[in-house]
Image (cartoon, rainbow, N blue to C red):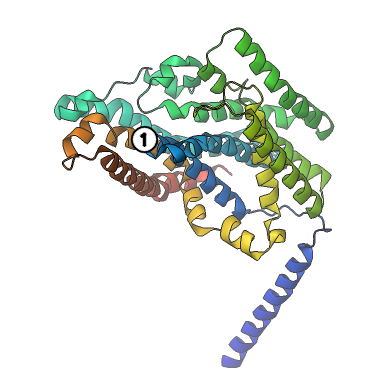
């Protein structure tokens, strides 16, 4: 029996060695890129995206030299858009002929999106009013939501512009609404599309988006409405979709991915630096700014797919970074929860009560760090409880 176990161990070792050697050969830059079922680098990109968003939302409490840098963290949302467009389009393209195509997609999206989202709505529309009524005190000073719950349940809050931007906790759900509206129409497009038709149409749409923004600015549409409308801020989603379809139809070589990724990354960063306004706010002033962010995010995505060709140091310490992987794992719930936690904690009434050493700047920093830590803890608890339980139900509908 012991000999048999030793033989089995040797056999498995030989299989692993042969697998690793074949993997090493497949990583040659001249080989065709084989899209794996699981891409761990994408978790790191999600982690990077949510980290950028966190930096943006604590940027007002850092020294002026850093606040301008932190204030560019809004591009993390556009990186999320590129990843969503890439992943969702890939899933739809591969199941294009499935008999349960629409049912599987929408059920899976509901199970992924709605548990954590409903928890946020319950907090904003049920728990907070109850705390105002029962506890009073500081809770009385928290403003009420400017939109009714029906707008959030229908996922149309991004069409209310100024009313949404005045929301104390739910303003960040504009990006979730854009993605949900994208999910509403995109499966029907992919179901009946062919590569020869859809790729030119997507390319044309990407080029037309800046023109739509120019028209919107010309007719005086407010900046946040342009920012939160899927017709004027879909660059990232469409770029991700192009990459997903191109990889599955053209079957490019790894060298091609690395070349295009590097070019898009350099062009996108250069255009972003050139186009970004000199103030600290998102660049609504240039209709081409979102295009530049979509380009640099697409370049980063392409480079990440072939990160094993970038050397072990860059691949291991960035594209396989464990802290970024953890942030990517909880990125959705962290995105939803962190804003209302920070807005609840870092407020003037709270600062006035606990700033006993009369050093407001230091107190703000302590509250910010506490709020970020609490957000990460709650996001992790949400991910391993209600979200995991919901995702486990996916098999029922397969």
Secondary structure beneath disc 1? helix
Q: Quadrant of residue 149?
A: top left
**In this view of the protein, which residue sits in the foreground, 51 or 251?**
51
Q: Residue at x 47, y 15 (%)?
A: 160
Locate the C terminus and report the quarter of the image it occupies: top right
Residue on which disc 1 sits: 119
Crowd tier of the residue under label 1, counting other residues whose Cα lies within 10 Å: few below 14, some 14–19, many 20 or above:
some
Q: Residue 285 lies in what quarter of the image?
A: top right
Q: Residue at x 19, y 33 (%)?
A: 352
Residue 36, percent from left and from top: 69, 54
Q: Could you tell whether 45 is left or right of 301 in the image? A: left
Residue 303 seen: yes
The residue under the point 63% across, 34% down is: 273
Count of numbered circles in the view: 1
**Residue 316, located in which quarter of the rendered image?**
bottom right
Instruction: Note whether residue 92 is visible.
Output: no
**In the current view of this chain or complex, which residue is farthest to the front?**
65
**Screen quadrant of the N terminus:** bottom right
Eyeballing the image, is 308 above or below 376? below
Picture coordinates of residue 133, whole percent (x, y)? 17, 24
Question: x, y percentage for residue 379?
Answer: 39, 45
Q: Position of residue 12 (x, y in %)?
A: 65, 78
Up-down: is 16 above or below 293?
Answer: below
Q: Which of 139 and 102 lies nearest the eye of the viewer?
A: 139
- Of residues 161 and 281, the one drawn nearer to the viewer in this rendering: 281
């Amino acid at each position: 029996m012991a000999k048999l176990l030793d033989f089995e161990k040797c056999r498995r070792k030989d299989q692993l060695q042969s697998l690793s050697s074949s993997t090493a050969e497949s990583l040659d830059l001249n080989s065709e890129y084989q899209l794996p079922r699981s891409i761990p680098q994408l978790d790191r990109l999600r982690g990077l995206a949510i980290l950028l968003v966190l930096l943006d939302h604590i940027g007002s409490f850092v020294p002026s030299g850093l606040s301008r840098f932190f204030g560019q963290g809004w591009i993390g949302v556009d990186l999320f858009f590129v990843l969503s467009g890439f992943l969702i389009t890939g899933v739809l393209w591969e199941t294009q002929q499935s008999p349960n195509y629409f049912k599987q997609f929408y059920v899976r999206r509901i199970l992924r999106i709605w548990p954590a989202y409903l928890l946020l709505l319950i907090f904003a529309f049920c728990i907070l009013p109850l705390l105002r009524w029962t506890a009073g005190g500081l809770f009385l000073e928290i403003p009420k939501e400017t939109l009714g719950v029906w707008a959030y349940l229908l996922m149309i809050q991004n069409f209310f512009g100024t009313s949404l931007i005045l929301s104390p906790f739910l303003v960040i759900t504009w990006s979730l609404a854009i993605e949900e509206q994208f999910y509403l129409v995109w499966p029907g497009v992919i179901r009946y599309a062919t590569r020869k038709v859809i790729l030119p149409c997507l390319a044309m749409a990407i080029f037309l988006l800046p023109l739509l923004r120019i028209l919107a600015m010309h007719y005086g549409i407010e900046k946040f409405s342009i920012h939160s409308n899927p017709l004027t801020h879909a660059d990232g989603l469409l770029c991700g979709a192009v990459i997903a379809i191109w990889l599955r139809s053209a079957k490019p070589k790894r060298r091609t991915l690395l070349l295009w990724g590097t070019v898009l990354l350099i062009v996108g960063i250069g255009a972003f630096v050139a186009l970004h306004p000199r103030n600290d706010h998102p660049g609504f002033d240039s209709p081409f700014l979102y295009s530049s962010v979509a380009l640099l995010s697409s370049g980063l995505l392409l480079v990440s797919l072939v990160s094993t060709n970038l050397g072990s140091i860059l691949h291991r310490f960035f594209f396989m970074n464990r802290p970024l992987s953890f942030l990517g794992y909880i990125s959705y719930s962290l995105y939803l929860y962190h804003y209302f936690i920070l807005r609840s904690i870092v407020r003037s009434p709270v600062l006035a009560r606990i700033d006993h050493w009369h050093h407001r700047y230091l107190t703000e920093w302590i509250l910010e760090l506490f709020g970020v830590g609490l957000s990460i803890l709650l996001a992790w608890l949400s991910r391993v409880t209600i979200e995991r339980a919901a995702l486990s139900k996916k098999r029922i509908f397969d």
